[in-house]
Image (tube, rainbow, N blue to C red):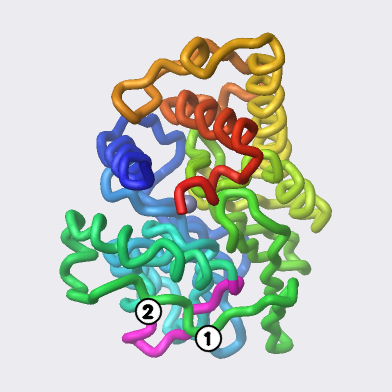
Amino acid sequence: MKRTWLILFFSVMLGGAFFLGGQPNTVKKIADGVWFREGDLKGEGHCNNIVVEMKDYLVVIDANFPSGAEALIGDIKKISKKPVKYVFDTHHHGDHAYGNPVWTKMGATTLAHAGVAAEMKAREPQRWKEAQSRKDVAKLNLPTAEPPKQTFTTSPHVITDGKRKIEFHHFGWAHTKGDGFAFLPEEKILCTGDAVVNGPYNYTGDGNVQNWVNVVNGAKKLGAKTVLPAHGPHGGTEILDGEAAFMTELVKAVKAARASNKKLADVVKMDGKTPKSTTLKLPDSVKNWVGDFFPMQVYDTWMELEKKTPRGDLNL
Ligand SMILES: [Zn+2]
């Protein structure tokens, strides 16, 4: 099951089924010393990256896939001569953490919430092996994913050097058990990882669907003005509101279907083990988040409610 989800996830990503509203492979300055690089989700499956300039060094948000890391390193050379000291993995997924060895090889310290290392321990090397179909992962010639070198359990974990402060927060389990957010309190800029995305990119297979909205609401309390998601274009607080509304409507719609005595087979049509279509509809107000993953999101939510266990623990 786990394998099916991931293959679907990456094949949909790589198959270019999505329209990406932003500007992949471009670096945009968000504030002084803060840059946003939108990943080539449609082509290479890359996540977005953020580069933050400190007094003497740089901090990168998300290690990306190895080829995404290489692309970002090329772009960093054009914007700063400072070395990358920290790379923050927002979670354990390949498009956020499989580039770890690329960064540590050049002297950076990979950093994450302890839940990221725990997820890797539970789910690797299986996924690493499945990802050998990617040339960039295979080229590293390593037996498994490289866990973050430094982890924290007390939230927020803070890095500061007098010039700038970055807080690394964990608000609980939404997209994965190790979900981390990076927040710049002075600039009110929030980097969300995959717990908050701008578009139909919510992968619920490792998630805790019913707790998701609590995590987003926790992040909202930081009072961010600028939101830099890990997939889709950047924006403002409307991205946080939209993500919270989408998750609320998703759970509400699945609960309503179950309460009306429908069976899963009435609501989700399967193609083998893959959810292919669903009869459920969500309000237009959240349509930005509804796309090709929707049948899978309905299925995952249904299973979570049925088994009374977070979806992510059902595929361990
Ligand atoms: Zn992810």
Disc 1 crowd, CA 10 A, few/some/many (<14, 14-19, 20+): some
Instruction: Find numbered disc 2 in the image and state the secondary structure of the residue it sits on.
Output: helix
Foreground residue among 200 and 56: 200
Which residue is identified by label 1? Answer: 57
In magenta, the rendered stretch is 103-114
User: In this orientation, does residue 22 appear?
Assistant: yes
Above or below, 281 against 42 in this view is above
Residue 269: assigned label: none
Residue 261: image quadrant is top right
Q: 31 or 151, which is in the foreground? A: 151
The location of residue 89, given as percent across then percent down, is 50, 68
Q: What residue type is disc 2 on?
A: Trp
The answer to whether 60 is drawn above or below residue 246 in the figure is below
109 in the magenta segment: yes
Residue 285 sits inside the magenta stretch: no
Tell me which residue sits at (45%, 30%) in the image: 293
The residue pinned by badge 2 equals 103
Most foreground residue, 157 or 69? 157
Q: Taking the image as drawn, is residue 61 in sight?
A: no
Mark with earlier residue (1, 2) = 1
If the image is split into quadrants, where does the N terminus sit? top left
SS label for mark 1 = loop
On screen, residue 104 above or below 197: below
14 on left or right of 297: left
How many callouts does the rendering have? 2
